[in-house]
Image (cartoon, coloured by chain):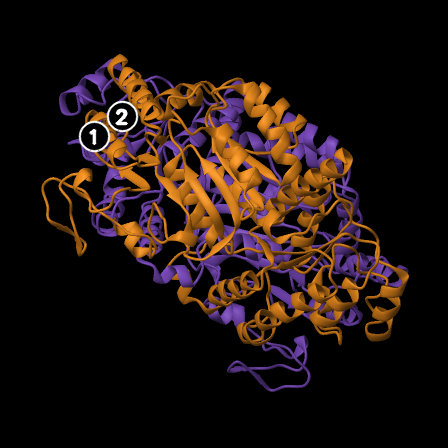
Chain colours: A purple, B orange
Amino acid sequence: MRFLIDHGFQGKLYPVNPTSSEILGLKVYPRLTEVPESSVDYVISCIPAGGVLSLLDDCGKKNVKLVHLFTARLKETGRDKEIKLQGEILQKARKLGIRILGPNCMGIYYPKLGLSFNHELPRESGPVGGFFQSGGGAGEFVRYAALRGIRFSKIISYGNASDIDEVELLNYFASDSETKVIASYIEGVKDGGKFARALALAAKKKPVIILKAGRGRAGAKLALSHTASLAGSIDVWKAALKQYGAIMVSNFQELIEQVVAFTFLPPITGRRVIVAGGGGGKSMISADVWEEEGFELPELSVAFRKKLKEKSPELWDWVRNPIDASLFQGTPVVDINLLEWLSNEEAYDIFVANLTQDDPLPNDIWEKVLAPNFLPSVMAIKKNGKPLICVIETGEIGLEEMKNWKWRAIAETRRQVIDQGLAVFPSPESAAQAVRRLVDYWAWRESEN
Amino acid sequence: MRFLIDHGFQGKLYPVNPTSSEILGLKVYPRLTEVPESSVDYVISCIPAGGVLSLLDDCGKKNVKLVHLFTARLKETGRDKEIKLQGEILQKARKLGIRILGPNCMGIYYPKLGLSFNHELPRESGPVGGFFQSGGGAGEFVRYAALRGIRFSKIISYGNASDIDEVELLNYFASDSETKVIASYIEGVKDGGKFARALALAAKKKPVIILKAGRGRAGAKLALSHTASLAGSIDVWKAALKQYGAIMVSNFQELIEQVVAFTFLPPITGRRVIVAGGGGGKSMISADVWEEEGFELPELSVAFRKKLKEKSPELWDWVRNPIDASLFQGTPVVDINLLEWLSNEEAYDIFVANLTQDDPLPNDIWEKVLAPNFLPSVMAIKKNGKPLICVIETGEIGLEEMKNWKWRAIAETRRQVIDQGLAVFPSPESAAQAVRRLVDYWAWRESEN
């Protein structure tokens, strides 16, 4: 009730509980059948499993369309009695024409309607939709991705998938006009062939990112006791996802990076990258990780070197791609010129701007010049229209460090850049991996047409 | 001068500059030969390259032992004149019996003496030493690793390595009693055979972690213009590092994770892991990533299940390794009991405690119960004496989020755990990778004896 009220749920809410008369300012009804409406659309069940069958009877009387069973400890316990009860619940729901979401799940986060299953999820909507077999994973994904500027159409936690399952959800999101990118966390599927066919259709419409959990022995056993899922062979999964054009990621962090890439970057199929910013070490590692993901770092053009020669005769033939921006300290070339010239280069597909704090300049110069210049500089590149990626490392900053102005300046810059709708990644390697998968996807789409 | 004064350098400091009379409260001498000491140990040169030869003449008169050339734009420019000048500098230094660090480097961070080359590096000493061909990379590494509780014996940025090079530095750190773990960032080596022999000796004494930069085409070209290094074939590097027992990492983040692992964990050679904490999704992904790194997640013992059965008859046969701690909500089993029982399990080598914020419990319970309980719980495991790893995800938190109590509570908990000298990693996958490399190293050491 608190999540729904906090998120401003736009419909009518009726708490049902036999022992209290008021919850969070709302009148409580002792039983669903006492609710003063001839029909009720949606019931969220938080009662113990043993009470669900009789709740369903009441739902039938109120013409309920969908019951979300937050209720758990059914098939996932692995015990005969609970497995049988889950079957009976499904059977009764089917007889009454009621759809079941779950059991053992968090249900629906649909910010447009104010439906929420957790604290502090964004209230605004956005283009990322998805279905998660883990409810905790869904909540954490939404919260962390939100800090990267991601907003959501709807996120559905579906747990044991007794009725509404991964195939139906994938089909739904594939045709949902509010969803441009599909993210998912799947422990197991009920019917591999059906899922493959749904995937083949979905991935041709929009990017489908799948975090497959239960890839090893321990994970497969745990899948049974977590959501009663059969994990399946990971090799089969890998082959199928590749064949049908879905993007496979290995952990929640990669899932977030991938969603950031697909949300903020256009369909890119080229692999030529210009990297600028950061000192020599950061530039070296950037070169390595981008190349290791199959990108190419083209030489800088004669036209660029000519412009550079006018302002900085000592550097014009020396700098390379990636551009070690620290070389320009003390020259008349300021970051914003450099980036503008670079962004006018023709022979590249992606521009990567690194902001690092590996800088020996005095604090005041960093604070007054470097940090405030980053946003205008990257916006100058953005004007050019080529895909732009920012790498800003604030990974390990905790409470105490926030008192330090330099970390604060980095965090503030990061927030400003995210607020401009730019793709920000926490490291060169996470950027290169996510963008490689994005380019692979769009190249595959192109090859399919 | 500012870095040295800020870090409380313990020797005498003499600024030399022809045009000013006072710098930061210190008397300035117009020329090194005017300094009122018959001999000077160490000179840091920040003058342009063209003045270094005559500076060396003055150094000779003052019996200087070591000159650090922060001075750059020598061999790395790729220009004949500068390459020749670097050679002349080295020749003159040799003739005068002076050692050269650099050119084109940040020099020495030695907190015990108050030597520092950057802002806000820790003043306390610790067991990690290392040599970095990138000065910016060295500074950023120190700052980020410091936030993970790492402290340093000395970190040396050595740039173009005209005199003091990677072989000499590796030999030095291998025999340095203040250094227990060696971290390095290398773009190229001058003599592969010599370096391999030094590595073979060093890695048998202590862990040697190498971030090799310049692994691809663009990076190799950049290595020439960054530190005038020949990057060498990455396949040769990989083979050599493996043969000689060094640990190869791919980026600065991995370097930090690896240093955290070697600093805070004992020599582990077993690969059986118990994972506890977090919801089902986090547990699933933990199982996958640990298994994918070659670890095994053993079944829980009969003795543990017996204890569990007494307090929680509904869960005793259901929970598995990894332990989904969210199952215990509402049972009489509290985290601290659970972890204590688990830590008494016999058949495991490493205990992994996950703290996640993927929790639908009301904020006040999280704040008053979950966050404050984490530290006592992990300390209860630590008492047992088995290697303990904490995974606390605070990766993407910025300024604004810090105002939110939940992020604050996580960041505070993280700080407390780090302050106890525990190994904290930001994700299951970073933990599993770093610990796998640690176990590989100690298993290799065992096999060599």
Q: Which picture quadrant has residue A345? A: top left
Question: Looking at the picture, does residue A339 appear above or below residue B374?
Answer: above
Q: Residue B260 placed where, x, y %?
A: 57, 49
Question: Looking at the picture, does residue A131 appear above or below residue B278?
Answer: above
Residue kind at label 2, given as amino acid type:
Arg
Q: Which residue has dot 2 on it?
A: B73
B142 and A218: which is toward the camera: B142
Work out whether residue B285 can be spotted.
Answer: yes
Q: Residue at x 29, y 19 (%)?
A: B88
The secondary structure type at the circle numbered 1 is loop
Compare marks 1 and 2 and give the one earlier in the sequence.
Answer: 1
The secondary structure type at the circle numbered 2 is loop
Count of residue discs: 2
Q: Residue A360 placed where, x, y %?
A: 30, 44
Q: Residue A348 placed where, x, y %?
A: 35, 21
Measure how far apart labels 1 and 2 are at the Cα level.
8 Å
B18 sits left or right of A350 in the view:
left
Work out whether residue A148 can be spotted.
Answer: no
Q: Residue at x 80, y 49 (%)?
A: A221
Question: In the rendered structure, the residue with mark 2 lies on which chain?
Answer: B
> Which label number is shown at residue B48?
1
Question: In the rendered structure, the residue with mark 1 lies on which chain?
Answer: B
Q: Which picture quadrant has residue B124? A: bottom left
> Which label number is shown at residue B343?
none
Question: Looking at the picture, does residue B146 appear above or below residue A21?
Answer: above
A266 sits left or right of B192 in the view:
left
Check contact, mark 1 vs mark 2: CB within 8 A.
yes
Q: Residue at x 27, y 12 (%)?
A: B80
Residue kind at label 1, given as amino acid type:
Pro
Q: Residue B312 placed where, x, y %?
A: 82, 72
